Image (cartoon, rainbow, N blue to C red):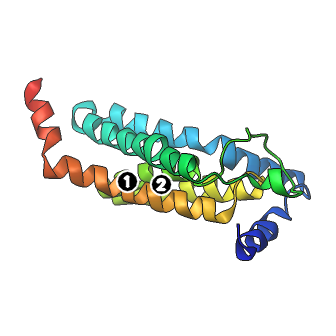
Amino acid sequence: MNGIDVAIFQTINQFAGRWPFLDSLGVFFASRLEYFLWFALFLFLLKNFKKNIFFVLHTFGAAAFSRYFIAQVVRWIWYRPRPFLVMNVNQLLQHTNEASFPSGHASFYFAMSTVVYLHNKKAGIIFFIASLLITFSRIFVGIHWPTDILAGGIIGILSGKAVVYFFKKFALSEKLKLLR
């Protein structure tokens, strides 16, 4: 971590532990808001299952690829300790001591948001706002560095675009529909 990363982290994290309402909001965004995004994708399926099933599968595929492949490979190559392991922080959320860089949440939810945005711009904007709240709050609660979030977000956006491109390029959705 560099000096700018530490300074930005401390600027955000210094507000944790001061006001119960803000703390509750930060913990909610960091650990629960993501379920609303999952529910929103479920609503796409309820609205029109046949039309949206491949879109939802692409969304989860991109998110899983981003988080469980790309981000995990980076973590294996480059271990970076979490803020609470190397300095005193206002930690509001407990977390394991696994690698911090890049943020798995950022890579997952920004990949998800990218695919949603490329499918439905209005819903995508809402997903991106929620992703920003989820990931920014993970700095606030003391479990990620700002560059963890930035790198995870970049990985997620690129993964989302790559998955959409891959499926369009090879027309996999159309081929899978024909198999039914």
- In this orientation, which residue lies closer to the viewer: 161 or 47? 161
Which residue is found at the position 72% from the left and 52% from the top? 81
Name the amino acid type tagged 1: Ser
Residue 67 spot, x, y in % from top left: 48, 44
Viewed as shown, does residue 113 lie left or right of 136? left
Query: In this picture, is 90 found above or below 69?
Result: below
Which residue is found at the position 86% from the left and 65% from the top? 14
Which residue is found at the position 28% from the left and 31% from the top? 49
Residue 131 spot, x, y in % from top left: 55, 54
- For the C terminus, the image quarter is top left
State which mark lies toward you, 2 or 1: 1
Residue 82 spot, x, y in % from top left: 73, 52
* Residue denoted by label 1: 159
* Residue denoted by label 2: 110
| Secondary structure type for disc 1 | helix
| Secondary structure type for disc 2 | helix
In the picture as drawn, the residue positioned furthest to the bottom comes out as: 4
Q: Classify mark 2: residues with Cα within 10 Å, few (<14), some (14-19) or many (20+).
A: many
Quadrant housing residue 162: bottom left
Q: Classify mark 1: residues with Cα within 10 Å, few (<14), some (14-19) or many (20+).
A: many
In the picture as drawn, the residue positioned furthest to the front comes out as: 77
- For the N terminus, the image quarter is bottom right
Viewed as shown, does residue 32 lie left or right of 40? right
